[in-house]
Structure formats: C-alpha cells, structure tokens
Amino acid sequence: MKHFTRILLVLVVASVLAPTGMYAQKKKKTAARRQQNTPQLVTYPQRDDAFKSSFKLTPLGSFKSDKVTSMDFFVVPAPDFEGHLLKRDTNRKQVKLQQVSCRQNQITDDDDWFIDNGLPSRETRIETPMDVFGPRFTYNTGGYLVTTYGENWGNTLKMIITDEHQQQYYAAYDFQNYIYSPKTTLMGNTQSIDDVVIEGNMLYVSHGSNSYSDGAGNQTGYITAFDMQKREIIWTTQPMTCNSKFAVCDNSIICGYGFTGESDNLYVIDKYSGQRVQRYPLKKMAFHVIVKNNKAYVRTYSYDYVFDVK
C-alpha cells in the first residue's frame, strides 16, 4: 500500500510540474522567435563632416504661391523604415534632463500654456479646405519660413523653404516616399510631416501617422536628418521615437513619442547619429517640446512638465 501511495504521489507531482516545464519551454521558444523576428539595429560610420552650422541656402528665384503645383520638387529618397543610425562619439556630451515639476492641465488650455510660460510657437496652422491641395502649416526655423503642403491633412508631404516674407524660395522637397511603410496593414494609416527644424545645412524633419502604430507595422514616428547641400539622408531614428514637436538643443534633440495604449516617453537623441541616448517615461503622450533658458517645457495631453536642461 505504501509503495502504491508513493507511486501515486510521484505521478501527481509530475503532472503538476510537467505543464510548468512545458510552459517554460514554450516561453523560451516564443522569446527566441521574437528575438529572431526583431530587426537588429545597424549603426553606420560617423559623418560629423556632414554637419555644417555656418551653411546658408542660396535663393533659387522668386516665390509665387499660386505657382506651387508647377514647381520642381526634389523627391527625397525613401528612408530605412527600421532606422539608419550612425555610430556615436561617446566623448561628445548630450544634454541631461532633470524633472522640476509635473502638473495636470485642463487639456484644452494650450494657448494659456504658451502665454503663461512665455514660450514661442514655431508653427502656424493655415486654414485650407480639407480636399484642396494647398498650404497646411508654416514653421519659423533657422531664419527661414518652411511651408508644408498636401492634398489633405493626412497627406502633408511637400515643403517649400522661403525667406520669412515669402519673396524668395530656397528649396522644394517632396517626402512622398514616407507616406507608407513596407509593413503598413491599414492603408488609411498615412504618414505626414509633423515638425521641421533647420540648423545650418541640416533639415531635421519628423514624420508619423496620427493613429495606432500597429497600423503602420510599428514603422512610424521618425526624425530624419537631411543634408540640404548634398540632398541626401544622413540618418533616420529608429521608429516610434517622435510624434511630438521637437527641439534641437546643443548636441541633442529632445522629442516625445506615445499614443493611446502605447508607452509615452520623452527621448534625448544624439543629433549627430540619430541614436536615443536617454528615455524619460511620461504620464501621457507629448505634444510640444520647447527649450527656453536651460529649461525644457513639455506639454502632454493632460500634464505639463518642466525639466532642467544640464
């Protein structure tokens, strides 16, 4: 009887442990499969000589707003939708952010946030009919005025760089190759220009879709560094890095990425390589990032943050 009881006990223990072991084995296989399917980010050689802060664009002619559709746009090559990163110079210091405050806002009080903090807005929205090709936004940056154009608000992929009075134009770019990622599963999930910053010869431009990232196969939310002198892409961040307005600060770019049901983060990026160097979790997705007097003001959906920039 004792022998039978011992056998029964062994069988019970085995039946309890076996599923656990099978589960653990299955979990390992799943993790291994995910690792195989996750693209490994490749870093390319540094290209510090591509960044020329003293560069100035040369006027190409007079600008006529009613002749935009007949202008010769340079079509920017398609980016690497997994990210095209350069190797970092670890001796080059990046800014560090230290949180000073986090306060709940009223969600609809964006204008008050700008006014109360004395913050400049680089972006102006232009009221154009939804189904008419025309200007959508203007951005004051680097001593230029950048105007974005599109057939609708979800297809804002062209930009023209002019002087601040729109008398002369310097460049016209078409980012049509950014509209869909290779992994897009929802054809309505288009990607358009979100923000633009010009510094020297470098055009930093962000693209993303105003929807869930899985509709674009998680290939959305980029910043691209585009050399306007040579007309080539220098680097592209890895996806899901930026869908906010961003700020260039010293050797760094500060931006946010997030969405409903996705992680909300603030990132510091090395502006010479495109690599993320710091991450700060946020309570909600960031809309605006503005640096003023060594402080970063971050406006999210329902919280306002202030960071010391060191």
Image (cartoon, rainbow, N blue to C red):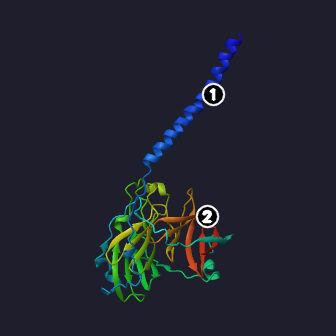
Q: Position of residue 152 (x, y in %)?
A: 41, 69
Residue farthest along the top direction in this orientation: 1
Q: Position of residue 271 (x, y in %)?
A: 46, 72
Please determine whether, in this image, residue 120 is positioned above or below residue 21.
below
Toward the viewer: 190 or 226?
Answer: 226
Instruction: State the image quarter where residue 264 is shown.
Output: bottom right
Please determine whether, in this image, residue 51 is positioned above or below residue 163.
above
Badge 2 element:
loop
Q: Which residue is mark 1?
A: 16
Under mark 2, the amino acid is Leu
> Badge 2: how crowded within 10 Å, few (<14), some, or many (20+)?
some
Residue 282 is labelled as 2
The quarter of the rendered structure image containing the N terminus is top right
Q: Earlier in the sequence, mark 1 or mark 2?
A: 1
Please determine whether, in this image, residue 20 is positioned above or below residue 40.
above
Residue farthest along the front direction in this orientation: 91
Residue 230 visible, this angle: yes
Circle count: 2
The residue at the point 47 percent across, 46 percent down is 34
Under mark 1, the amino acid is Val
Q: Nearer the viewer, mark 1 or mark 2?
A: 1
Q: Position of residue 68 (x, y in %)?
A: 33, 79
> Badge 1: how crowded within 10 Å, few (<14), some, or many (20+)?
few
Question: Spatial distance from mark 1 to mark 2, Cα to Cα?
Answer: 42 Å
Badge 1 element:
helix
Q: Position of residue 100 (x, y in %)?
A: 67, 73
Residue 296 is labelled as none
- Asked if residue 35 lies left or right of residue 158, the reply is right
Toward the viewer: 157 or 125?
Answer: 157
